[in-house]
């Protein structure tokens, strides 16, 4: 179900240096996500989203951004895509992401987008404009197997489409890479999968991969994830319970070995581990001599 809601503010400040993406601000235009990934952290009870499959559209988002953007003194990178996908299907209709990018471009902000959708290609011209300052698009790819992705990310475009979108963005000159996170214990934490992602990243023109070698599990998310494990991977729920109990951090039992394999493969393929950030440059008075 799609519902319109009123937001109070749009940009939240990212406290301290963000070592993952170099963000200064976070932007969430929607609440809930139709991509329906079974492992999604945004289902955790701490976020107080009643029904994650309901998509709440912040209908006044653009009006608020028109006021908030010019009022910010630091023009750092605005990140979108950590709590929901800014290019989930509802974006086709409401175009809040597109309108936000137009405003970021107008006011000189840089952007980092996390998505699983090739709908981002619709905004390629805008991203090219913002790229004159800094724009990065990071696709989440945790398996290259479209069939498996259909089970664990049932509402999202398949990885093969995401890799093609990376190719198109990269060819256009937009800084593009991959988040390989989470790596699901006993499902996607294999040498074959990790090497496959790095190789296909290279083939598609991705410049970087940001990896984790496990997953986090919290209350709310755990119940949903385990229910889906029971449906699709009989016997795995018990293995998770035995290995992790109620732990938040759930590293793959293979995390050390996989990390070494990943690093070696990235070196071989010439893929950067972690991304380059935008560093705001202070303007200086031009002088003649
Ligand atoms: S695309 Fe991201 S936010 Fe949406 S369901 Fe999947 S993990 Fe959650």
Image (cartoon, rainbow, N blue to C red):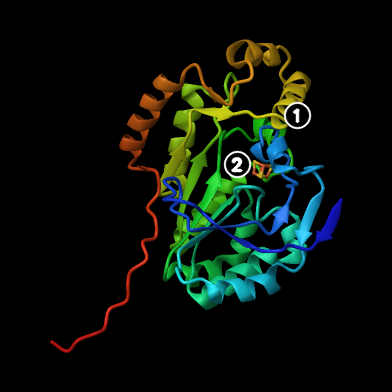
Quadrant of ligand 1 in image: top right
| Secondary structure of residue under mark 1 | helix
Query: Is residue 30 positioned above or below 162 on the image?
Result: below
Q: Residue at x 87, y 50 (%)?
A: 1
Question: Nearest the camera: 106 or 187?
Answer: 106
Tell me what residue is drawn at x 41 percent, y 46 percent: 19
The residue at 27%/78% (across/down) is 284
**Extreme residue in the bottom direction:** 288
Give percent across and percent down for residue 253. 50, 16
Task: Give the numbered dot on residue 224.
Answer: 1
Labels 1 and 2: the sequence-earlier one: 2
Quadrant where the C terminus is found in the figure:
bottom left
Residue 236: percent from the left, percent from the top?
Answer: 67, 15
Mark 1–mark 2 distance (CA, rounded to whole Å):
23 Å
Image quarter for residue 153? top right
Label 2 CA crowd tier, 10 Å (few <14, some 14–19, many 20+): many
In the image, 29 versus 205, the foreground residue is 29
Residue at numbered disc 2:
159
In the image, taking residue 229 as reference, residue 268 lies left or right, namely left
Tell me the SS state at disc 2.
helix
């Amino acid at each position: 179900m799609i519902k319109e809601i009123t937001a109070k503010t749009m940009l939240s400040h990212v406290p301290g240096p963000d070592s993952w993406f170099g963000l200064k601000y976070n932007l969430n235009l929607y609440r809930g996500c139709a991509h329906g990934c079974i492992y999604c952290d945004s289902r955790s009870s701490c976020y107080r989203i009643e029904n994650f499959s309901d998509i709440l559209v912040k209908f006044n988002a653009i009006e608020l951004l028109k006021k908030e953007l010019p009022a910010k003194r630091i023009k750092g990178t605005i990140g979108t895509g950590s709590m929901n996908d800014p290019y989930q299907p509802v974006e086709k209709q409401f175009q809040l992401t597109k309108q936000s990018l137009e405003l970021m471009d107008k006011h000189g902000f840089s952007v980092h987008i996390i998505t699983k959708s090739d709908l981002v290609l619709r905004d390629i011209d805008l991203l090219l404009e913002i790229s004159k300052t800094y724009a990065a698009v990071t696709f989440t790819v945790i398996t290259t197997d479209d069939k498996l992705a259909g089970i664990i990310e049932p509402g999202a475009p398949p990885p093969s489409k995401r890799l093609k979108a990376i190719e198109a963005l990269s060819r256009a000159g937009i800084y593009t890479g991959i988040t390989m996170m989470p790596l699901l214990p006993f499902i996607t934490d294999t040498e074959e999968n990790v090497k496959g992602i790095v190789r296909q990243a290279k083939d598609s023109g991705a410049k970087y991969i940001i990896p984790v070698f496990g997953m986090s599990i919290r209350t709310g998310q755990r119940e949903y994830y385990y229910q889906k494990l029971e449906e699709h991977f009989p016997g795995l729920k018990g293995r998770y319970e035995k290995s992790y109990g109620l732990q938040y951090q759930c590293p793959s039992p293979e995390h050390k070995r996989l990390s070494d394999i990943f690093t070696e493969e990235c070196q071989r393929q010439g893929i950067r581990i972690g991304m380059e950030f935008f560093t705001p440059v202070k303007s200086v008075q031009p002088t003649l001599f």
